[in-house]
Image (cartoon, rainbow, N blue to C red):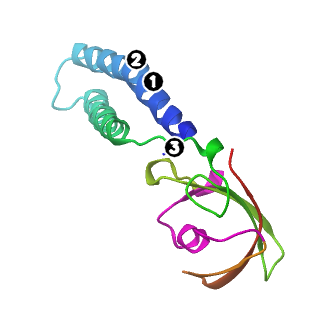
């Protein structure tokens, strides 16, 4: 996991424990004051939210306890975990920038590419100027590696 990914998950965990958890407890207490719990929609919604929050807390604690944080700024060379890669689609000439990250921090909308994805697996070991063929759900795609950086 990258340092940024670890920090983001750690911040989410702290927010869940210090903000979300107490808010849910307050919401449950308020809903209980309304009386009959069997037909109390606010109570059931608050309990459902509590279940989600507690599940996410456990998930984040497990991820962070097993995390191996890699300082990507000390890496160089061919594409590997942590690399920020500038690609150009050879069919459309559209440029895209991705950072190859761990599964738990991946977010394609933010350019954070899961290391287990077909594109990331195809990029591993490539250098600037190399072409990459990737089989995607939409068909074969060809990319050229324009730049590799380690931030």
Callout 3 secondary element = loop
Q: Tell me where the magenta segment starts and ends, as one range.
A: 108-128
Label 2 Cα crowd, 10 Å radius (few <14 / some 14-19 / many 20+): few
* Residue 38 x, y percent position in the rendering: 15, 31
Q: Along the horizontal axis of the image, is 28 left or right of 145? A: left
Label count reads 3
Q: As rendered, which of 85 and 23 lies closer to the eye? A: 85
Q: Quadrant of residue 25?
A: top left
Residue that carries the numbered disc 3 in the rendered image: 70
Callout 1 secondary element = helix
Q: Which mark is residue 18?
A: 2
What's the CA distance linking mark 1 and mark 2?
A: 5 Å
Q: Earlier in the sequence, mark 2 or mark 3?
A: 2
State which quarter of the image contains the C terminus: top right
Please, is residue 106 above or below residue 19 in the view?
below
Magenta highlight on residue 113: yes
Label 3 Cα crowd, 10 Å radius (few <14 / some 14-19 / many 20+): some
Q: Along the horizontal axis of the image, is 90 left or right of 6? A: right
The residue shown at (84%, 75%) is 93
The residue shown at (51%, 43%) is 70
Q: Which mark is residue 15?
A: 1
Q: Along the horizontal axis of the image, is 76 left or right of 21? A: right
């Amino acid at each position: 996991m990258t340092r940024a990914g670890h920090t983001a998950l750690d911040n989410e965990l702290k927010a869940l424990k210090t903000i979300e958890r107490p808010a849910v407890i307050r919401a449950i207490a308020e809903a209980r004051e309304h009386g009959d719990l069997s037909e109390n929609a606010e109570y059931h919604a608050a309990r459902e939210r509590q279940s989600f929050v507690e599940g996410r807390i456990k998930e984040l604690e497990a991820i962070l306890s097993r995390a191996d944080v890699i300082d990507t700024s000390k890496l160089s060379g061919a594409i590997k975990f942590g690399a920020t890669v500038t690609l150009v689609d050879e069919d459309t000439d559209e440029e895209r920038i991705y950072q190859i990250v761990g599964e738990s921090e991946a977010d394609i909308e933010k350019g954070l590419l899961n290391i287990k994805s077909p594109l990331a697996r195809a990029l591993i070991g490539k250098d600037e100027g190399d072409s990459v063929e990737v089989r995607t759900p939409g068909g074969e795609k060809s990319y050229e590696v324009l730049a590799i950086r380690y931030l």
